[in-house]
Image: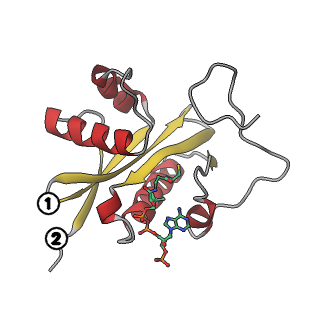
Amino acid sequence: MIPPLTFRFIKKASAVTLREIITLYRAQGWWGRRDKPGLLPRLIKGSHCFVVAEREGRVIGIGRAISDGVGDAYIQDVTVLKSERGTGAGSEIVKAIARRLKTDGIKWIGLIAQDNSSPFYARLGFKLMKRARPMLSKGSIGLVTE
Ligand SMILES: CC(C)(COP(=O)(O)OP(=O)(O)OC[C@H]1O[C@@H](n2cnc3c(N)ncnc32)[C@H](O)[C@@H]1OP(=O)(O)O)[C@@H](O)C(=O)NCCC(=O)NCCS
């Protein structure tokens, strides 16, 4: 039998958990050589919420929301270890974050669906925004097409 997945919101994490989270960020190319591991605890603490999915105590997926805590929130950094994809972890992470945000009274929940992931979010009830495109300020680290 496959060991069950568990999900928990964290505000701080053990050194082992922090390393596992960084492994996920690195695998996705969201954590570069110049990003300091020492900043991760602040990133977690400063997020509105940060969820880890674990199997047998090992972090296999993450996701978080940044928010003013009142009206609006963005979901980001949703990723699952390649070997664990397709088992429902990604969906459960997004659902857990969305539930938490709604419980906290947040009515506007947005995200940027990177790497053609919009069908994944569409299955979870997200819709494309009309007359809107994500943009990055000059000098930001990220993919810019123009
Ligand atoms: C997107 C991601 C988080 C999904 O995680 P996951 O654990 O595989 O998701 P689930 O198992 O809950 O998948 C739910 C369904 O969505 C589909 N799906 C998953 N990723 C998809 C994608 N990128 N595009 C289209 N459909 C996708 C799955 O095939 C599955 O469908 P099925 O039930 O018919 O098989 C994972 O593929 C990932 O980490 N990708 C890299 C990072 C990324 O793109 N993050 C999102 C953008 S910020």
Q: Is residue 95 visible?
A: yes
Q: Position of residue 19 (x, y in %)?
A: 22, 36
Label 2 neighbour load within 10 Å: few <14, some 14-19, many 20+: few
> Could you say whether the residue bearing mark 1 is in a helix, strand or loop?
loop
Is the N terminus in the top left, top right, bottom left or bottom right quadrant? bottom left
Q: Which numbered tag is attached to residue 56?
A: 1
Is the C terminus in the top left, top right, bottom left or bottom right quadrant? top right
Disc 2 marks a residue whose amino acid type is Pro
Find residue 137 and report its image quarter. top right
Residue drawn at point x = 61 percent, y = 52 percent: 113
- 58 or 8, nearer to the observer: 58
Q: Position of residue 109 (x, y in %)?
A: 61, 48
Label 1 neighbour load within 10 Å: few <14, some 14-19, many 20+: few
Q: Earlier in the sequence, mark 2 or mark 1?
A: 2
Distance Cα–Cα, label 2 vs label 1: 7 Å
The residue that mark 2 highlights is 3
CB atoms of marks 2 and 1 within 8 Å: yes
Residue drawn at point x = 33 percent, y = 20 percent: 36
Task: Note whether 29 is above or below 41 in the view shown.
Answer: below
Task: Note whether 68 is above or below 59 in the view shown.
Answer: above
> Could you say whether the residue bearing mark 2 is in a helix, strand or loop?
loop
